[in-house]
Image (cartoon, coloured by chain):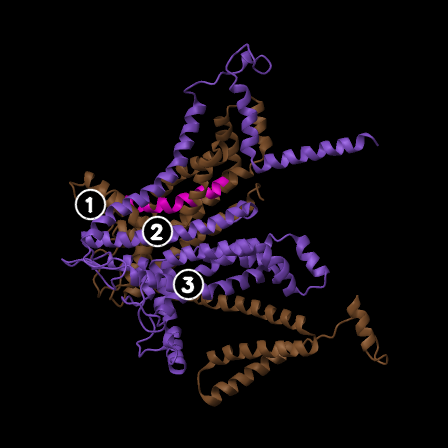
Chain colours: A brown, B purple
Amino acid sequence: MTTTVTSHRTRPPAEPATLRARRLPWYAAPALAVAALALSAVIVYGTDIGGPVLVVALGAVLYLTGLFAAANAVEGRRSARNRTWSALIHSAFVLAVLPLVSVVWTLVSKGAERLDVNFFQTSMNNIGARDANGGAYHAILGTLEQVGIATLITVPLGILCAIYIVEYGRGKFAFAIRFFVDVMTGIPSIVSGLFVLAFWVLVVSPWFNDGRPSFSGFAAALALSVLMLPTIVRSTEEMLRLVPPPLREGAYALGVPKWKTILRVVLPTALPGIVTGVMLAIARAAGETAPVLLVAGGGAAINVNPFENNQSSLSLFVYQQAGDASKYAPARAWTAALTLVALVLILTIAAKLLARRNRLSR
Amino acid sequence: MGETPHRSADAGTGGTRVTQSHEWPAGASARVAEAPVSTRSPGGVGLGGGGALPRSRKFGAERAFHGLTLAAGTAVLVIIAAIAIFLIAKAVPALRANTENFWSYEGWSPNETEPKFGIGTLAFGTVLSAALALLMAVPVALGIALYLSHYAPRRLGTALGFLVDLLAAVPSVVFGLWGRDIFVNPVRDFSVWLNEYFGWIPIFGGDGPFGKSIMLGALVLAIMVLPIITSLSREVFLQTPTANEEAALALGATRWEMLRTAVLPYGRPGIIAAVMLGLGRALGETIALAMTLGITFGISFNLIQNGGNTIAANIANAFGEANETGRGALIASGLVLFTITLIVNITARAIIYRRREFTESAA
């Protein structure tokens, strides 16, 4: 109020009184951008200190300064700040999109090179440095087996743990479990790999294997379980909390015991959400390389048995092919990476779509 | 008129009770369920002459199921304890065999007959690369989160938010491969340029070769943690009460002033937690750094020369040719990493737990 009054007083009476603040014309921003780019091109090419990337970077800085100065002169300081920050926020978005587009583009263009039937039907057994063929059958098999076993271990364990936290747990003990589930989410994958190495491969596996430590796909599955468990517990816990209390109370009123209520009423209601969480956990586990490298060892041949001898996995295959000296290896690495990303993204998208159809939403 | 306040007071208490039972549904309903079952004496004090009600049995299905879930819950604590115990058990023999100081020696040769290894350089590289990555990723991630929550049209914001969530799922080995094969070229050019014009600053000095440097590793790491920080902080920003935002706008605030006075203060604990979680991920990242860093041992702040190493990357690279002491040494370094990430994560979670409304929905 006061500002309007004072501005009326200071303004000469001849000028028509307007309630709208003065604004930069609509063409000011694009014009400034072009001017900034032109100026930066002149500076960069005039002094010969860089290429087109520097022109854009310097142009952006010049544009931001120019925009601030112009808005400051015409619209005032607050509006100038608003415009500059808005431009910065938009440019942050553009800045982040560039590398991600590059990742996707490289993945598709380079991965298409070896995307043939042979790649999915052969292993790397007896494939030398001069052989152009060879494929990832053994790796895909390994990924499926390891992730499958890990899912079999973690899904019952995770769901029971979440049921304890939500339905039975009381006081400090339940809080401690909840807290450490959250902390467990942040355990690095390499540490879980080292744990299974120290626990299963070096201590337990010699019992089954004439006293020699042995790598196996099962060990990798154990390491992946450590990574999947907290994700599944957290998502299941959230879903169980969303089940409306009247459903439970209705079951109790009919005389159904609590355990049967949980199994027959609560779990089926929360099922779509739980499945979503499980699929996201599987997608995360399928992409892990480090634990598989430490405890499954990798291998070139097809190994169907997950309990004995080395096994590879798709992500480990990418890593090993990337480090291979053969000139055909990079193409295999990229195709395997494309396969892996496709697998992970299909799982993730399916999970998110399922979550969208879920009736128990927040 | 006399009755009206009484009724509204009743409705008020009813409302509170319902909200409570929404927050702790299990607690509210469990009391309802257990009350009749736990009355032991059939004809005595029980509610409504509970002779017809089932008695609680000592070894019934209910007890068994309760015990089963309790065991599953305890398993989490057991696993965390087991991780610490087994890592320590395997690390101690190697640490005993170490002929140099574990904390200060610069180098990693545990496979010799006189094992020498030190965590100093690796821990330094881990912290340096993670800190650099966060320094680059956090402002950009917050910018994107603000763009998605407050600048973009609602539909576009939702769609792009979905896309960001997808990017968080891309495996790290893919980012590593991309960083090693593609991204290294622009980074090398940039490093040469920096070295030419800013070589007088020590962090950009050196005579090359450039490329597989701390800078490449930190940039790749930044790109990887970006989606995580973005998606968490976007959720926090979206939860800002509309009343606060509208109040700021009604007082004449510009959009940036609204963001600064209403959205950012409200989201601060959430932002801190998101950054800490991103830090946890950056510290533990293995494969992407094993593929992009130029594995050397030595403490150097030079960002653009080939070099750099982290605890996790060293484990992945050195594991292949490690003997028993070597494995123990790597496990010891993993123990250090585990401790660091545990501290970071516990701090982040403690911050989140202070604000329950954030906990209920995010992460």
Residue A67: x and y in percent read 62, 77
Q: Which part of the image, by quadrant, shows the C terminus of chain A?
A: top right
Residue denoted by label 1: A213
| A63 is higher (above) or lower (below) than B329 | below
Residue nearest the viewer, comparing A219 with B2: B2
What amino acid type should be assigned to the residue bearing mark 2? Phe
Instruction: Say what secondary structure mark 3 lies in.
Output: helix
Q: CA distance from mark 2 to mark 1?
A: 24 Å
Chain under numbered label 1 = A
Instruction: Locate residue A304, reporting x and y percent.
Output: 26, 45
Do the CB atoms of the residues marked 3 and 1 lie less than 8 Å apart?
A: no
Q: Would you call the spot at circle 1 few (<14 residues within 10 Å), some (14-19), or many (20 or more)?
A: some
A328 in the magenta segment: no
Amino acid type shown at disc 3: Ala
In the rendered structure, the answer to whether residue B230 lies left or right of residue B245 reads left
Query: To which residue does mark 2 refer?
Result: B338
- Give the numbered dot on residue B39: none
> Which region of the structure is painted magenta?
A218-237
Per the picture, the main secondary structure of the magenta-coloured stretch is: helix
The residue at 30%/47% (across/down) is A195
Q: Are marks 2 and 3 on the same chain?
A: yes
Which residue is denoted by mark 3 in the rendering?
Answer: B131
- The amino acid pointed to by label 1 is Pro
